[in-house]
Structures are given as C-alpha cells and as structure tokens.
Amino acid sequence: MAKRDYYEVLGVQRNVDDAELKKAYRKLAMKFHPDRNPDDNDAQEHFKEAQEAYDVLKDPKRRSAYDQFGHAATGPGARGPAGFDGDVGDVFGDIFGDIFGGRGGRGGARQQQRGSDLRFAIELDLEEAVTGITREIRIPTLGECKKCDGSGAEDGDKTSCTTCGGVGQVRMQQGIFSVQQTCPACKGMGQVIKNPCPSCHGQGRVRETKTLSVKIPSGVDTGDRIRLAGEGEAGMTGAPAGDLYVEVRVRAHRLFERDGDDLYCEVPIHFTTAAIGGELEIPTLNGQVKLKIPAETQTGRMFRLKGKGVKSVRSHRQGDLMCKVVIETPVRLSKAQKSLLKQFQETYETSKTDHNPKSSSWLGGVKEFFDRMTS
C-alpha cells in the first residue's frame, strides 16, 4: 500500500509551525496508542503512521528533504522512524512529561540533582569594562558541608533505598498508563541515610559566604555574563554544584556614551573656531589626541577618530570614537565684546556674499509658506 502524505497523516497544512505540528501529533498519539486500543490493529497502524510522520517533519533537515523529494527522502539511508517497536517510554515522556512531573527515562537510573545556579551583578566603570579587571566578590550560597564532606551522613554510611530498590524511581499506575516517578522515600537518590550529619541535617550542604576572584575580560558591556563553573550552590548529599553567572553592568560615563564597540561624545566649540577653523584636544580612553576643526564647521557635524573606541571582547574589532561638535553661544559678554559683535553683524549688511545659506534658505521657505497660505 502506498504511503500517505505525512502532512495528511497529521492533518496539518504544509506551512505548519513546530508548535502546531507537535500539538497535532500528540492528539493522534493519545487517540491511537495501543494501550488505549489493545485489540485494535487499525489503531496500532495509525499510531505507527503518525509517529513516522512526526519523526520526519519535526526535523528541519528531514522535513526539507521530504518537501523536495517526498517519501524517497525517507527510504534506506535516512534515519528511520522509531515505529511502535521503538521505545514507547520516550514517546510518553514527551507527551506526558509536563503532566506527571518529568520524563521517566530509559532504565529508570537514578540521577543526582545538581545544585542551583546563582547570578551575581557586578558594576564597572567604563574604563574598567574597556581594559578588563580582576575583582573579588562575596557570594552568599549553600556550600558543601565540611564535617561530612557533603555526604549528609555523620558516619558516611548510606544504605540502598528499600522503596525503589536503589534505582531512585518508582512506577505508578495512572489509569491505563504506567508512569515512572521520583521515589518519595529517597528523593531519587537511591540511597537513604541512617545517621544524618548534625551540621547539615543530612542535606550535605550548609549556608556560607564565600569570596571569589573574578577576572573580567577587556571589552565587556552591560548584559554580558561570565560563567564560573561549579561555583553555584552545592548539590544535596554530594551532588554536583551549580554554576555562578556574573552579570556585567557598566555605569554611565560623564563624557562617553557606548554603542557596541563605538564611543560617542559631544565636543563644545567656540563659534569663532567653527567659523575660521582650529584645533582641539580631544580626550580618549588612551589619552588625548588632536582634532582638526575645518573652517565653516556647522553644529552637529560628526568627526570619526578611527580605532579610539572599544576593542570587542568577541571579535576583537577595535571600535571608533565619534565626536559630535556643538557650537556654544558665548555668555556673560562685556560691553566691549558686545560692541565688537555688533560691528561684526553690521558687516553682513554691506557684504554681497551670503554668509548664512541655511538661514537664507529657511527664510525663503517661510516666505513661500505664507504666500501659499494667503493666496
């Protein structure tokens, strides 16, 4: 018998997204699973068909190949579907894991529950973030109990759990389904402690504050995280410790604003410098540099200083420093200075040269606007 189209099998459109694809598959798996239809061969075939279709379409590469070549892409040489003779426990772990508290897993082997990960925020000045720094931090956490070496047992003696037989999980019946759950007696450890450690009360860990030296690489920015493996909370009764994530926050700077690897700053200049040109001393993170201001510079003009930004922590690209000039109007002028400015202004009226093209253009636009309004 010719195979049906996989999209038809699952009852979905060819442009279906992953969430809808999974939802359609779960619905069919629930309906046709052999445990619900023990004597129905047709239901078993439908279940195998749905599982085969989902196995192909959930994989982006296999789905793309199927869309191009149809069932020929799923023949010998391709990763075959699990079928009903595969591991049914994995199917139910995927479908019912969120309902019954996690996957049963194969073989029911016990797993130690590692300690929780921790997060610590560290504030840096821009200079520290750019050049890198080593900081000491103090972390309140749950550390390994020294008295029992993290075992939780006063004498180090543990016995196999009689409830689960040492495997850490028990099988429970949920209606027609048989579901594996963490053993309630040993909390999945497979072992029980007869004489708990008095310091940690059998937990294998105690509250403490530890001091760590953290090396911050150069070029980090706000939001970057540094992972310190095994420096999180200790696991219970000897389980592995979690990790510590140090999150960087860079304080606002008085002169510079950072955007990726580039730095931006505003540079106030005298209007005489803007008119006739000049040279300024510009601060950078590596010292001062000279910036030449050409004559007739307008406010808002941006000057780029190559390589005076931040060196990326990832690509090692050196950013630039972008300087935006802002013409500053002089204040608190003396009578003599005001008189000189008035004399300078009078020269405009006798000059045949248009010294302010932007003003002239703007005034022309204003005149045209009012002419249209009154016509």
Image (spheres, rainbow, N blue to C red):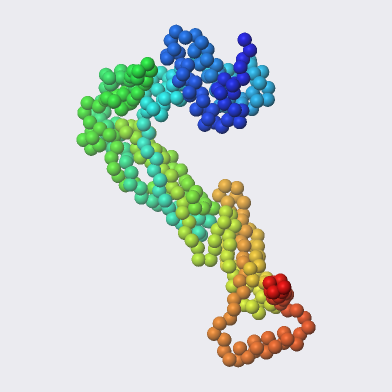
The location of residue 34, given as percent across then percent down, is: 45, 13
11, 178: nearer the viewer: 11
| Left or right: 39 as drawn, with respect to 281 | left
The residue lying at 64 percent from left, 71 percent from top is 299
The location of residue 364, given as percent across then percent down, is: 72, 74
The residue lying at 25 percent from left, 27 percent from top is 193
Q: Residue reaching furthest front?
A: 375
Taking 274 as reference, is 86 above or below it? above
Q: Is residue 85 visible?
A: no
| Left or right: 265 as drawn, with respect to 121 | right
The location of residue 93, given as percent across then percent down, is: 43, 23
Number of residue marks: 0
The residue lying at 34 percent from left, 25 percent from top is 182
Please tell me in which quadrant of the rendered image residue 354 appears. bottom right
Q: Residue reaching furthest right?
A: 352
Taking 171 as reference, is 124 above or below it? below
Q: Can residue 267 be seen in this view?
A: yes
Image quadrant containing the N terminus:
top right
320, 197: nearer the viewer: 320
Please tell me in which quadrant of the rendered image residue 238 appears. top left
246, 102: nearer the viewer: 102
The residue lying at 68 percent from left, 86 percent from top is 345
Image quadrant containing the C terminus:
bottom right
